Amino acid sequence: MSGIQLDRRALMGAGLAGAAAAASMSVSRANPAPLAPGVSKADFAGAIKAMRDVVGAEWSFGDPDAVIPWSKTYIPDPTHVHVPVGAVAPATVEQVQEIVRIANKFKQPIWTISTGKNMGYGMAAPATPGQIVLDLKRMNRILEVDAELGTALVEPGVTYQQLKDYLEENNIPLWIDVPTVGPIASPVGNTLDRGVGYTPYGEHFTFQCGMEVVLPSGELMRTGMGSIEGTTAWQAFKWGYGPYVDGLFTQSNFGVVTKMGLWLMPKPPVYKPFMVRHNNMDDVPAIIDAMRPLRVASLIPNVNLMMSASYQLAMFKRRSDVVPDGAPLDDESVKKVAKANGLGMWNTYFALYGTEQTVAGVEPIIRAALAPSGGEVLTEAEMDGNPWFHHHKTLMEGGLNLDEIGLLRWRGAGGGLAWFAPVAAAKGKEAQAQTGLARSILEKHGFDYTAAYAIGWRDLHHIIALLFDKSDPEQEKKADACYRELVTEFGKKGWASYRTGVNSMALVAEQYGKVNRDFNALLKDAIDPNHILSPGKSGIL
């Protein structure tokens, strides 16, 4: 690494610290967000003007008031670090290329988003100060759907709702796989952050095939088979020839993805959803150890969501519906309200997909395997009309809803949410230890354990929703301290996050060690020598 590049990193760190020291002053005309280190007012003004010439005045913003829509977050940000200085919304890949060239000319960093709706991870806000948001929402074309191969090619502004509507309107018997707030989220954005869903196609990056990427130089690259003129296999064969590079553009700032191929699931003849209800918090290891062999053998083909009662209740209830204001959220109170709503203390959702014969053949095997865990295996026959069952039934068939936005109301109108998502092996003892550690840290800071486990093939994603009142400055400070303790204490146990928000990207990167960080920095220096693409993304400046 050159001395200049190291100096730039030091400046970025100093800029972040300086912005933090500015503390709780709100961004306004009188007190605008700080520019990026090394960027002068003239540079910023020149970049905004040049970008405006590319996209038009109605799609380029450099005024503090005009960028407020890109500044809203639900994560804890008590010192107002995560605020952009501008925004630009191109409509074509050629405009993206030109904006990247302009950013290089003026050394003005740009923060790329698709729809900017990753609610518990930072929305559209940048990880470090002084960035112009590159908002790709106008690039919203479904370019191709191949019903025979079950593939799609889409731009980053396409939403899951848009893609589902297209399939239904054209009578194409393919399912999408969605994250929690699918209607407003982007398949491209979610896949690039390695998000997960609920059908057998739930590992989104696994079912991605081919990208078009604007590199930091402004050049356009197609991965996999996409660079071959006349190819018909761009969305059919992932690997292409030579090193496989698609992963480099996930959770990184090495390029701007402007097209992505997706594999879609054929609609099965039979779909049957289940819920397994367990009544005690300490049932965690029994559930995990019963589910793991079924997932490894793919007898249960989709990601299981094992939801705590508190998380489930937070979707449709307020905290004050469970305990009085100011009281701790004790297990007995949660259990009482959960039982009244047809829920256990843990509720695990999975589904079977196939023909009448295959589903009928597998179901008894699964019931027998789950019996030792002590849970009740329930179907729609027993749970019809239950809103929580309906929510998961919808998700596990690629359906769309916004039910989990209700989490934002749990502690009042302030709407604070930060996802903490450490990964472990799918073993009961590890899950039990994680649950205990999480509860102790959350309770220490005055927050509730509202969590779920996503049981993958061999892994666990422990999805903890840190819910707080963002309108209360003191509570926001406590949430920030709590989140940082979760990251560091879980990291000490070897449980680092698989994904995180802009408030903690550098901190999570630290958990993965110096060699990994240095390698990412080496790639960044080579690919993006001016460090203009999303500095701070995943801790890569």
Image (cartoon, rainbow, N blue to C red):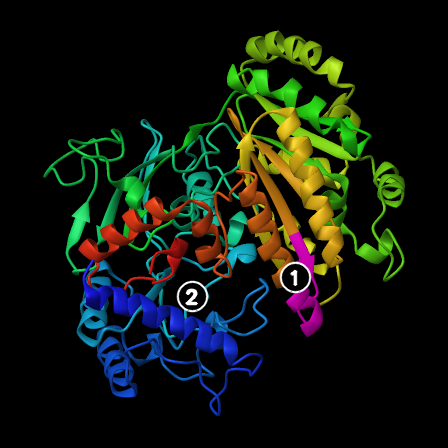
What residue is drawn where x is 65% and y is 25%? 428
Q: Quadrant of residue 90?
A: bottom left
Using the image, tell me which numbered label, if any, was put on residue 173.
Answer: none
Can residue 349 be found in the magenta stretch?
A: no
Q: Is residue 168 above or below residue 201?
A: below
Cα separation, mark 1 vs mark 2, equals 19 Å
Using the image, tell me which numbered label, if any, was put on residue 126.
Answer: 2
Can residue 470 be found in the magenta stretch?
A: yes
| Residue that lies at the very extreme toward the left in this rendered image | 229
* First along the sequence among labels 1 and 2: 2
Neighbour class for label 1 at 10 Å: few (<14), some, many (≥20)? many
Q: Is residue 383 above or below residue 486?
A: above
What residue is drawn where x is 75% and y is 13%? 372
Q: Which residue is mark 1?
A: 479
Instruction: Please indicate whether residue 50 sits to the left or right of residue 167 in the image.
Output: left
Q: Position of residue 341 (x, y in %)?
A: 84, 39
The magenta-colored residue range is 466-478
Q: What's under tag 2, amino acid-wise?
A: Pro
| The N terminus sits in image quarter | bottom left
What residue is drawn where x is 23% and y is 83%? 46
Q: Position of residue 330 (x, y in %)?
A: 85, 46
What residue is drawn where x is 41% and y is 81%? 34
Front residue of 190/525: it is 525
